[in-house]
Image: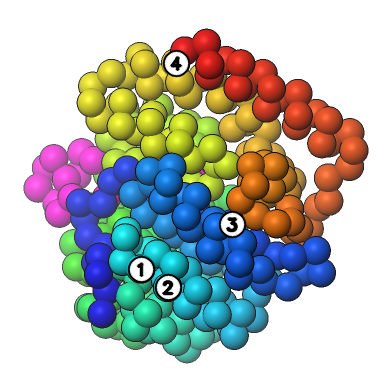
Amino acid sequence: MSTHKLDESASGVYIISATPFDDSGAVDLDSADRLVDFYIEKGVSGITILGMMGEAQKMSPDESESFLARVMRRVDGRLPVVVGVSNAGLDNLVRLSKASMDQGAAGVMVAPLAGLGTEQKIYNYFCQVFEALGPGIPVCYQDYPFATRSEISVPLFNRMVAEFDQLVMLKHEECPGLGKISAVRQASDDGLRRVSILCGNGGLYLPQELARGADGAMTGFAYPEMLVDVVALHLAGDQDKAEDLFDAYLPLVRHEQQPGFGLALRKEVLYRRGVIASPKVRAPGPTLTTTDKDELSRIIIRVQKNAEAL
């Protein structure tokens, strides 16, 4: 049974975990242990595994379940774990979802199938997902049209909130998308069940998202302590101090958010911080050149200098 069940009150930082591989490309479970300890030490509210930036699409079902089991053992009930279960096959999605909940996960994250196109198709798909999972598995809707090419409108999302109690969270990473946050929040002000909104996009727009009513972040920036502190400062009412801290790290946030390249940077930073044994991105994926690494070093030095000045 889950120690923590995901619900509408979720807030803070649910870090998107990297999946560590060794230099040969095999899953590195020892590094997974260190990664869990690192995230918890930095004060995150939860951990999300097997997301798109966790390279879940490059892992076999057995690898995914092995990684899930190792993370859940290491977490040992200390905080909630959300599992990305998106899959082209509904049976596979359900299998991993049920395995996740059996291992003690808090809930699952599901993105629409790539290229569904119309809102009716998105609605029909999630009707099937919710029916297959059943009401006992909380669901986070991953809204990332850059990757899925499936856009959901606010009216359709609100319709699903009204019809499906197990839909408890929106992972928001549409861009531009600040207006969507405001509109979803307005609906809850008008009486619709309020769901949690956690935002991705590497944290690139986090201060503005928080100001629009988001409850925190669900992303994988390699300095999670910054995300934690920014969210805490904002929730405490010190928006200026939150933005000052965010601005100190912004060059690295921006650099890490490069499509198709940012994950290699993120893993390189985690490697340099001593968390994972190798910065390997599983093929097909980028490998940093000497110039890339030197460039990253300069950005990190400047970011650390800016943060220390605060």
Which of the two labelled residues, at mark 3 and mark 2, occupies the earlier sequence position? 3
Res 268 label: none
Q: Is 156 situated above or below 176?
A: below
Say how many tags the image has.
4
Residue 81 location, quadrant: bottom left
Q: CA distance from mark 4 to mark 2?
A: 37 Å
Check if mark 1's residue and mark 2's residue have beta carbons within 8 Å: yes
Q: Is residue 50 left or right of residue 216?
A: right
Q: CA distance from mark 1 to mark 2?
A: 5 Å
Check if mark 4's residue and mark 3's residue have beta carbons within 8 Å: no
Per the image, the residue denoted by label 1 is 76
Residue 44, visible in the rendered structure: yes
Give residue 48's position: percent from left, percent from top.
44, 59
CA neighbours of label 3 inside 10 A, class few (<14), some (14 to 19), many (20+): many
Q: Which marked residue is nearer to the observer: mark 1 or mark 4?
A: 1
Point out the residue furthest to the right here: 290
Q: Is 68 situated above or below 46?
A: below
Residue 234 location, quadrant: top left
Magenta stretch: residue 188 in it?
yes
Per the image, the residue denoted by label 2 is 73
Per the image, the residue denoted by label 4 is 244
Q: Quadrant of the N terminus?
A: bottom left
Q: Is residue 170 left or right of residue 150?
A: left
Per the image, the residue denoted by label 3 is 18
Colour pattern of the rendering: rainbow
Q: Residue at x 27, y 35 (%)?
A: 213
Magenta stretch: residue 66 in it?
no
Q: CA distance from mark 3 to mark 2?
A: 17 Å
Q: Residue at x 51, y 85 (%)?
A: 92
Residue 207 location, quadrant: top left
Q: Secondary structure at mark 3?
A: loop
The magenta segment: 185-202
